[in-house]
Amino acid sequence: MRRILVALTAGVAAAISASPGAQGPVFRANSDAVPVYVSVRAGGDTVGALQSSDFALTDRGVSQTLGLVSSDSVPIDVTLVVDTSSSVINSLPLFRSEVQAIVGQLQTNEQIRLITFDAEVRQILAMQAPSERPPVQQIQLGDTTSLADALGFALARALRADRRHLVFVFTDGYDTSSILGYGALPELASHTDSIVHIALVRPSGTDLPSAGAIGALSSAAARTGGSLYQPTQNVGGIVAAFQRAIEDFRHSYVLYFTPTDVAAPGWHDISVKVTKPGNFDVRAREGYFGR
């Protein structure tokens, strides 16, 4: 079973890495330039007007020389991944209204894709410009839950070098029928260019998933530079989490570097800091795989 999971993870990672015709700096193991999306906040507000010289990045503990690309020049693709399993039956009307609200927040140069999952993973809406009437009525109740498979499908998308990709998931966190398991998610997330944010929803009368499940989801998001948002039962809670996620992404910095004085193969831990005086909350991916 472990060999099957490894093979599936590698296959999805290969699909993620295969982006025909990509140009410019892209975050892949076989690229010379490694881009890193970095969000910076201070006192809860995003921090603008930083230069490459205001950042310090290490790759396996070795300082790297940085360049910076304005995030304003790199528009965003958003993939929404919506849980429609039987355990969220009471949340489906909320989910439909939240999807409608999220789509309404997108800018004209941004695009949206909609995926739902229960026992099956379905692409309801292919990546396209936002519409005033997204097909929310196609968000229909299913049965068992394939959360890990849905996240894998969302990430297994050939990315364009001139756009960034935000994956936003809302789910109760349970997985009962995936081929991939929770344990595969951090590894899978390590191979992607995308930023993953996961909003947990706690339907009334239900328990949280296991600590192991939450840990795997949190680790997968953190590997990409994203977040796991704590469970909410509030109307608007999902939208509030999305607003923070996309605000960070819209105002993120795109740093890039060519790894120097570090061996290529295997996992590379990276660390990003702001060198200017102040108390900054810096969020970036935790590393990348080199070859």
Image (cartoon, grey):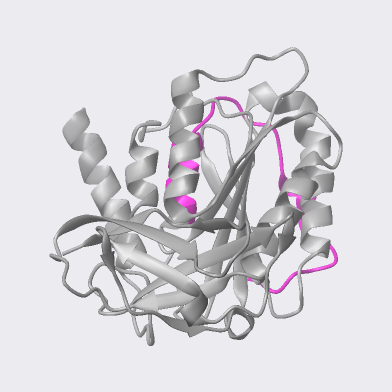
Task: Report the residue at 35% width, 32% height from top.
Answer: 183
Please provide percent x and percent y for residue 226: 54, 51
Name the image quarter holding residue 158. bottom left
Is-magenta flag for residue 209? Answer: no
Image quadrant in which you'd find residue 234: top right
In the picture as drawn, the residue positioned furthest to the front comes out as 277
Count of labels in the image: 0
Q: Is residue 265 left or right of residue 153?
A: left
Residue 126 visible in image: no
- Split into 4 quadrants, where in the image is the N terminus? top left
Q: Which residue is pictured at 73% across the width and 25% down the height?
A: 89
Whether residue 25 can be seen here: yes
Queried whether the magenta region covers residue 148, the answer comes back as yes
Span of residues in magenta? 128-154
184 or 279, nearer to the observer? 279
User: Who's the residue at 39% across and 53% down the image?
Assistant: 286
Q: Nearer the viewer, residue 215 or 45?
A: 45
Q: Whole-percent x and y of residue 263?
A: 13, 65
- The C terminus appears in which quarter of the rendering? bottom left
Residue 150's x, y, as percent? 49, 44
Task: State the image quarter where residue 265 is shown.
Answer: bottom left
Tell me if 130 is positioned left or right of 5 in this view.
right
Q: Viewer-proximal residue, 16 or 216?
A: 216
Q: Where is residue 90 in the image (x, y as percent from the top left)?
A: 79, 25
